[in-house]
Image (spheres, rainbow, N blue to C red):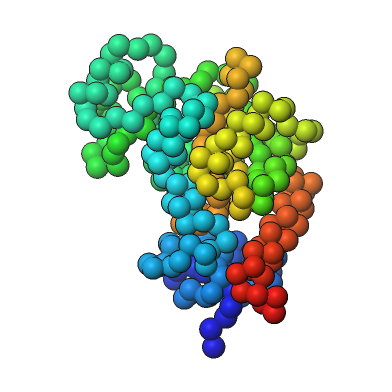
């Protein structure tokens, strides 16, 4: 019997998701499924032919959040503040950029999370063979105490302002402020209005402000710059290993928003 709503995963991605699907299933009170239902929370590859209306998070939003190249194209088009970023299509362009500018540049892997694959480069020969193009080359923002701020949005409401910092001597080992490399989250008070406005603009560019997404930002010379936007889906999910005050609010907001949209799609009896 086909379920009306479910947490949809693919069997070939199940190993990478850990216990996240089970946690989400319990939170939303819907089963885990391998085939599309009438209304889906996607935490795997997007099923072919799935109507956008059948997904809690817009399909284009999931695709954009999973590919930093698409994000940077949209951010440029919609004037979302970011560190200086270039999409490079060939080695000649890359050599010209690296030779004619100062400062450190980062080659970002377009579909990774947690800084996986990112590397500082000084010469075009340092790009590994087979690296996806266009290349994302972003200015490395130097910080005395590296930290990344994050804020969440569920159904248009923004909350959960927190900061991620590297612990101990981790800053001497690598430049990426990621949870997977030892960074820890600390909940903060209300987000600065300028950070809120910048984050909302980024989410709007990706089509996620009315469903579910998060924004990572850095404070550079009193200007908030967007590093990337994230959401659940396409074999990735937003890190839930955050302060309890944040996760409690996130869970409640996500449960309510999912139930409300499911009712709108499936009808009151869902």
Q: Is residue 213 left or right of residue 235?
A: right
Q: Is residue 207 left or right of residue 256?
A: left
Give coordinates of residue 177: x percent, y percent: 56, 33
Q: Nearer the viewer, residue 160 or 114?
A: 160
Q: Is residue 83 visible?
A: yes
Q: Quadrant location of the N terminus?
A: bottom right
Give coordinates of residue 88: x percent, y percent: 29, 29
Q: Is residue 169 visible?
A: no
Relative to 1, residue 174 above or below: above
Relative to 258, residue 221 above or below: above
Give me the residue at 51% from left, 56% from top.
Answer: 58
Give coordinates of residue 9: x percent, y percent: 49, 68
| Picture quadrant of residue 186 | top right
Q: Nearer the viewer, residue 14 or 156?
A: 156
Give me the residue at 52% from left, 75% from top.
Answer: 37
Q: Quadrant location of the C terminus?
A: bottom right
Relative to 35, residue 139 above or below: above
Give me the residue at 67% from left, 33% from top.
Answer: 196
Give coordinates of residue 171: x percent, y percent: 57, 26
Q: Nearer the viewer, residue 135 or 104?
A: 135
Give me the residue at 72% from left, 27% from top.
Answer: 192
Relative to 123, residue 209 above or below: below
């Amino acid at each position: 019997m086909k379920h009306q709503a479910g947490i949809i995963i693919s069997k070939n991605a199940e190993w990478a998701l850990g216990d996240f699907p089970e946690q989400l299933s319990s939170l939303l009170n819907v089963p885990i499924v391998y085939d599309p239902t009438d209304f889906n929370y996607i935490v795997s590859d997007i099923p072919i032919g799935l109507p956008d209306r059948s997904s809690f998070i817009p399909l284009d939003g999931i695709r954009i959040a999973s590919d930093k190249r698409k994000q940077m194209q949209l951010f440029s088009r919609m004037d979302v503040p970011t560190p200086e970023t270039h999409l490079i299509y060939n080695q000649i362009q890359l050599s010209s950029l690296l030779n004619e500018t100062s400062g450190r540049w980062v080659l970002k892997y377009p579909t990774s999370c947690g800084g996986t694959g990112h590397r500082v480069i000084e010469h075009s020969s340092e790009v590994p063979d087979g690296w996806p193009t266009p290349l994302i080359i972003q200015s490395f923002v130097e910080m005395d105490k590296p930290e990344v701020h994050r804020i969440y949005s569920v159904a248009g409401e923004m909350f959960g302002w927190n900061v991620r910092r590297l612990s101990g001597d981790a800053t001497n080992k690598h430049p990426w402020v990621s949870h997977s490399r030892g960074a820890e989250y600390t909940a903060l008070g209300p987000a600065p209005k300028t950070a809120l406005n910048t984050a909302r603009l980024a989410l709007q560019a990706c089509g996620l402000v009315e469903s579910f997404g998060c924004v990572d930002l850095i404070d550079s010379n009193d200007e908030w710059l967007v590093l990337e936007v994230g959401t659940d889906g396409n074999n990735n999910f937003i890190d839930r290993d955050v302060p309890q005050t944040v996760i409690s609010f996130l869970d409640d907001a996500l449960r309510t928003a999912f139930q409300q949209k499911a009712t709108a799609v499936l009808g009151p009896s869902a």
